[in-house]
Amino acid sequence: MAEDCLFCGIVAGTVPADIVYADDAAVAFRDINPQAPVHVLVVPREHVVDLRELGGRPDLAGPYVAAIGKVADNLDAPDFRTVFNTGAPVGQSVFHIHAHLLAGRPMGWPPG
Ligand code: 5GP
Ligand code: ZN
């Protein structure tokens, strides 16, 4: 657990969140500012900063990616988009890796 990390606080239960899924590897909760009818953030329990750091942790990566699929299944969202922002200039604002899992409305590509 990292000091002053919002998502470590949610994992630890010290920061309230609308948790929709949890297992040994990951926790998922609804985004406070949803961009789609389903907008959930999936985070590993362990503090990992971003996708690059996750690449160095294959022990975590497999269970974490598996959890993302399970979250979608549990939310009855067979079709979904995942976004990982990596770096502040492209929009990362919380430096504990999180998959944005978005579903429930049509989405174009490329994203607007
Ligand atoms: P990022 O910009 O780092 O890719 O995504 C961070 C996300 O966390 C944003 O979509 C933002 O709405 C969400 N967020 C920020 N603070 C909180 C919070 O306290 N609770 C929840 N559930 N989501 C948050
Ligand atoms: Zn953290």
Image: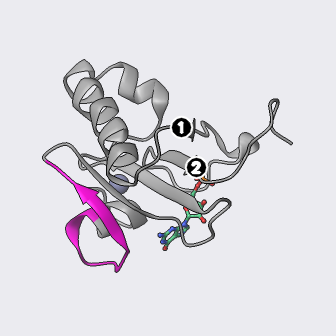
Task: Locate the C terminus and report the quarter of the image it occupies.
Answer: top right
Q: Which residue is mark 2?
A: 103
User: Residue 60, relative to residue 107: is it above or below?
Assistant: above
Residue for badge 1: 79
- Tag 2's secondary structure? strand
Taking 33 as reference, is 27 above or below it?
A: above
**Residue 62's image quarter?**
top left
Which residue is rendered at x = 35% and y = 36% of the image? Answer: 69
Amino acid carrying label 1: it is Asp
- Mark 2 within 8 Å of ligand 1, using the beta carbon: no
Kindly identify the amino acid type of the residue bearing the numbered disc 2.
Ala
* Residue 88 percent location from the top left of the image: 68, 46
Please give the name of the residue rendered at 38% of the width and 20% of the height, measured from the top-left corner: 55
Q: On the image, which quarter does residue 37 sit in?
A: bottom right
How far across and how far down the image is residue 100, in percent? 54, 48
Dot 1 surroundings within 10 Å: few (below 14), some, or many (20 or more)? few
* Residue 3 picture quarter: bottom left
